[in-house]
Image (cartoon, rainbow, N blue to C red):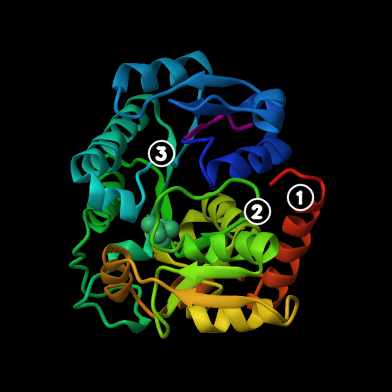
Amino acid sequence: MKNILVTGSVGQIGSELTLELRRRYGNGNVIAGINRTQPTGALAETGPFMKVDATNREELAAAVKKYNIDTIYHLAAVLSAVGEKNPGLAWNIGVNGLYNVLEVAREFNCAVFFPSSIGAFGPTTPLDNTPQDTIQRPTSMYGITKVTGEMLCDYYHLRFGVDTRGVRFPGIISNVTLPGGGTTDYAVEIYYEAVKHQRFTCPLSKGTFLDMMYMPDAINAAVNIMEADPSRLKHRNAFNVSSMSFDPEIIAAEIRKHIPGFIMEYDVDPIKQKIADSWPNYMDDSAAREEWGWNPVYNLESMTRDMLAVITEKHRKGLI
Ligand code: AKB
């Protein structure tokens, strides 16, 4: 039986992953770690939650002890665009928070899931078919924290035997909790604006290709890597995973198949554009496919159909 702690459980990925983990491993066995934002709805109602600030090691250790935790999904993070506005905060949460998680995991013998990101790459990385093992010299603070995190996770496994595992997530698209302050957020916002106003002002320019993934596949990635047979893992951390790659024109054209009058305008945000230009156009995720069977279900077409159906229904009910 597993006892799981999720840090950052009210965030974009955490709010859905925590519920899926509860479905799989039992409501009472999955603790939602919260910090500043209180959980609401299903997250608050279906299982335990507890204040866990990853930058506070005592608080982390207390949660792990209290609930006899054996697996930590460490999702608390500051995303790329916010990280450029507040690099110190990005470092503190991204690196010091992870260091605390790894130290507590070492002491209490926990497995750790750590989400790295396409942000761990930089302008000198090969941007097409980006290999699993390649140059990583990111130029955003977010990226620097992610490369540091990947290396820390490898170190704790090699040096102390901590069962660390993780993936490099692309932009994650979802319809439950909005992402907060990422470069890829436009690919979520576009669906909401298309439904509500039939138009969207895009902060990234035409031709900016980035890897993306629909939330159900992201959740499967996080669960399946932790369930994988360790004897098959040549890498443990930072597996490239992707489901699709598109630029703003391609996603707009897909939306127009459902909302023919949809209008796309551009007002490029220089900070986000600079970050996006330094990230891969599309990654090679064959190591994840070979080593633990990564196989995403959704593509742009099926994701768009689902996103628009869910958001249209929410709009009809006056929820957004
Ligand atoms: C961001 O844009 O910062 C994140 C990411 C790709 O890691 N969504």
Horizontally, residue 100 falls left or right of residue 298, namely left
Which marked residue is nearer to the observer: mark 2 or mark 1?
A: 1
216, 310: nearer the viewer? 310
Check disc 3 and report its element: helix, strand or loop.
Answer: loop
Counting other residues with Cα less than 10 Å from the Cα at mark 3, is it few (<14), some (14-19), or many (20 or more)? many
Magenta segment boundaries in residue numbering:
1-7
User: Contact, CB < 8 Å: mark 2 with mark 3?
Assistant: no
86, 119: nearer the viewer? 86
The reply to whether the magenta stretch includes residue 18 is no
Residue, x 24% and y 41% (percent of image)?
Answer: 95
Residue, x 29% and y 76% (percent of image)?
Answer: 277
User: Contact, CB < 8 Å: mark 2 with mark 1?
Assistant: yes
Relative vertical location of residue 24 with respect to residue 212 in this rendering, above or below: above
Q: Which residue has dot 1 on it?
A: 314
Mark 2 and mark 3: span between their CA atoms? 19 Å
Q: Amino acid at mark 1?
A: Lys
Residue, x 20% and y 46% (percent of image)?
Answer: 87
Check disc 2 and report its element: helix, strand or loop.
Answer: loop
Residue 294 visible (yes or no)? no
220, 209: nearer the viewer? 209
